[in-house]
Amino acid sequence: MDSEKIILTTEIFRVLASETRVTLLKKLYQRRMTVSELSRELKIAKSTVHEHLALMTTAGLIVPAPDDHQWKYYEITRKGTNLLLPENSVPITILLSSLGSLSLVGSLAAFVVVWLSRSHEAVSVPIHGAGYTGYSGLDLVPVGIGILLLITGILIFIRLFRVRASFNSDEGALS
C-alpha cells in the first residue's frame, strides 16, 4: 500500500476548481478510459476533454496508461485517489486505530476501577447506632464512562474495518 502525501498547491486547486475535471477524475477512478469514451459520457468535445486531461496529467492526478492498445487510455494515480478518498490514506487509518485502541483501553480501565472499588469496600462501622457508612451500589460514573468508551471504541473499529475494506477493493479496481 503506497501512501502519497498530498500537498495542495495552486496547480491542484486550479485543477479542482473545474467541476468537469472533478467529474473526469471520478470517471477515471471507476475505470481507465480513452478521450473518446470520456467525451461521449460527459457530452463534451474531445478537444475540451483533452485539455482537461492535460492539466490533470501535469498536476499528477492521472497518467496515460502504459499498454499496447491503439487508443491512449488514462488512469487515476494514487495521488488522485487520495484526493478523492482521503479517508483511505495511511494517516487516517493510523489515527482511527489509535483512537479505537485508546477508547477500548479507557473502557477497560474504567471497569477495573469499578471492580476494585467493589472488591475492596471500606469497613462498615455503625455511626452511633444510626446506620452504616458503606455504600452497596455501583459507582455509576466509572460504569457510564466505561460503557461510553467501549461503545466508542467498537464504533471506531467498525469504521476502520469498513475504510480498510473499501481501500482494498479500490486497490483491486485500480490495478
Image (cartoon, grey):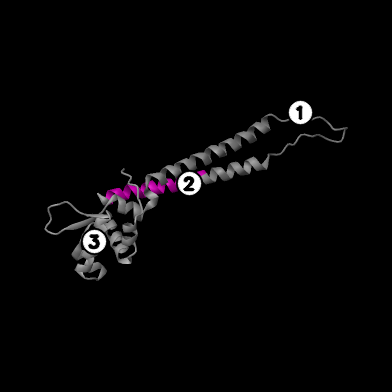
- Provide residue 10's location: percent of width, then percent of height: 34, 58
Q: Give the range drawn in magenta.
A: 153-173
Give the number of the mark in front: 1 or 2.
2
Left or right of 70 in this view: 116: right
- The answer to whether mark 1 and mark 2 are in CB contact below 8 A is no
Q: Which of marks 2 and 3 is nearer the N terminus?
A: 3
Does the magenta run of residues contain 28? no
- Report the amino acid beneath label 1: Val
- Residue 33's mark? none
Answer left or right for 155 relative to 28: right
- Nearer to us in this view, 59 or 149: 59
Is residue 43 positioned above or below 9 on the image?
Answer: below
- In this rendering, position of residue 137 left or right of residue 100: right
Instruction: Say which element carries label 3.
Output: helix
Instruction: Write down the quadrant of residue 122 in the picture.
Output: top right
Mark 1–mark 3 CB contact (< 8 Å):
no
Q: Are marks 2 and 3 in contact (CB under 8 Å)?
A: no
User: Callout 2, which amino acid?
Assistant: Ile
Q: What SS does tag 1 mark? A: loop
> Which residue occupies 61% across, 43% down?
145
Q: Which residue is drawn at 14% across and 59% down?
A: 71
What residue is shown with label 3?
53
CA–CA distance between discs 2 and 3?
A: 38 Å
Q: Mark 2 points at which residue?
A: 156
Which residue position is annotated with label 1? 123
Q: Which of marks 1 and 3 is nearer the N terminus?
A: 3
Q: How crowded is mark 3: few (under 14 residues within 10 Å), some or many (20 or more)?
A: many
**In x, y percent, where is residue 90?**
38, 44
- Indicate the amino acid at tag 3: Leu
Q: Which comes before the other along the chain, label 1 or label 2?
A: 1
What predominant SS class does the magenta segment belong to?
A: helix
Frontmost of labels 1 and 3 is 3
